[in-house]
Amino acid sequence: MATTRARPALVALAALAAACGDTLVDQHADPGLLAGATCGPALAACNGACVPEDASHCGPTCAVCTAAGPDPNGVPACISQACGFECRPGFLRAGDACERAVAVAAGYVHTCAVAAGEVFCWGNNSTGDVGDGTTTLRASPVKVAGLGDVTAVAAGGGENTGAGVGTYYGHSCAIASGGVIWCWGGNESGQLGDGTNAQQPSPVKVAGLRDPATAVAVGDRHTCAVAAAAVWCWGANGSGQLGDGTTTNRLGPVQAIPSGATAVAAGAEHACAVAGGALACWGDNSSGQSNGGANAPGILAKPNPVALGAITPASTATGGAHSCAAGTGGELACFGANDHSQLGAPPSARGSLTVNVPAVRAPATGLAHTCALLADGGVQYWGANDRGQVGAPSGAGAAISTPTFVSGR
């Protein structure tokens, strides 16, 4: 909040201005009258008033910022009451360069991206989800310190229930130089894999993985990775989501699949992997998300083969209570909960079906909605839309049961 130290002369002028239905700023009052003004963060002192800082109003002298920085995609900006530069929309600032992202991951209420071999995160940060060493919410990207040569990033989390309803938690992981996995954020169930359950707002190394990782996936409070073609998981395990045959939380990696794995995905409390040209899922199965749509048994604590008919899976995605797999021929199979049409069909308790979409490159799943990146670069969506999450032109509303193309407006 902006504050000023009032002077008698200023008080008198303010009273006169009020009586005339005017303001001091409108009358171009002498800025010298406010020589003692102190503006708070993100505010500039201009013409005797504290105004939001921008490139045309910066710092205690209300400077106009003109330098766009050394990168052609930079633009002048006022940053912490001093002139500098920022990157145009669509670019992330890595040092003095503006870079395009090569990977992105969305958690429950935070987001991370990889650009120039570095990780940038933003959003909710109450459990250190963003990885900048603080628990301060970040409305714009901040760099995760200490990581280089990053090739992949994953983000997850959820919302507390009961007394904690309306509060959030999350964690993030990245594969960095040498195939080493680093994680940060909430760790109450050991989901960071560092051998503790202490929250970490800065990256910590996952302990116990001997081989370089090639893939990492983050769920609600658990994490899985592929290293040397084996699947390893750690963190919460109350629904068997670590795939080690138990329901015991693990502070470090335990093996779920010994060999042949090429891809892994972590849902709310389940996981799926492509291994040996087949799909296997494990964990919570209350909606059939780990057993091809059949919800018995309720928990599968070891990897369970999921039959996909003639489809040979190439990649997989897992949501709140549904799962999908894209085939080598561009097919897409989804199974599990369908109460919000997340399987691409009219609502039902659960099911399993081949979604009627053009050739698919990769699927993506949210809590109760699904998207597909098509081979030609198009994107189709379906499922829950109560918050506009599928991008329908009509805005937020009823669930979308038919795959529909995303379009810009």
Image (cartoon, grey):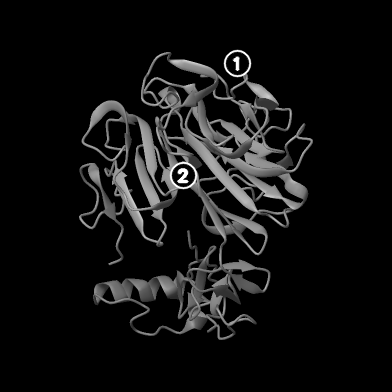
Q: Secondary structure at mark 1?
A: loop
Density class for disc 2 (Cα within 10 Å; few <14, some 14-19, many ≥20) is: some
From the image, which quarter does the C terminus lie in? bottom left
Query: Closer to us: mark 2 or mark 1?
Result: 1
Q: Is residue 121 above or below residue 245?
A: below
Where is residue 247? Give x, y as percent. Answer: 58, 15
Q: Residue furthest front?
A: 310
Q: Is residue 220 left or right of residue 142?
A: left
Position in image of residue 334 (x %, y %): 37, 36
Query: Mark 1, residues whose alpha carbon is within 10 Å: few (<14), some, or many (≥20)?
Result: some
Task: Identify the mark nearer the N-term, 2 or 1.
Answer: 2
Q: Residue at x 73, y 36 (%)?
A: 206
Amino acid type shown at disc 2 = Val
Residue 275: which quarter of the image?
Answer: top right
How many marks on residues?
2
Q: Which sits in the foreground, 246 or 161?
A: 246
Disc 1 residue type (three-letter): Gly
Q: Which one is nearer the viewer's eye here, 64 or 142?
A: 142
Q: Secondary structure at mark 2?
A: loop
Considering only vertical position in the picture, is 82 above or below 310?
below
Q: Check disc 1 and report the residue beneath it.
A: 245
Give me the C-alpha separation between circle 2 and circle 1: 31 Å
Q: Which residue is found at the position 75% from the left and 43% from the top?
A: 212
- For the point 56% across and 63% down, the residue is 101
Which residue matches tag 2?
A: 109
Q: Is residue 3 left or right of residue 148?
A: left
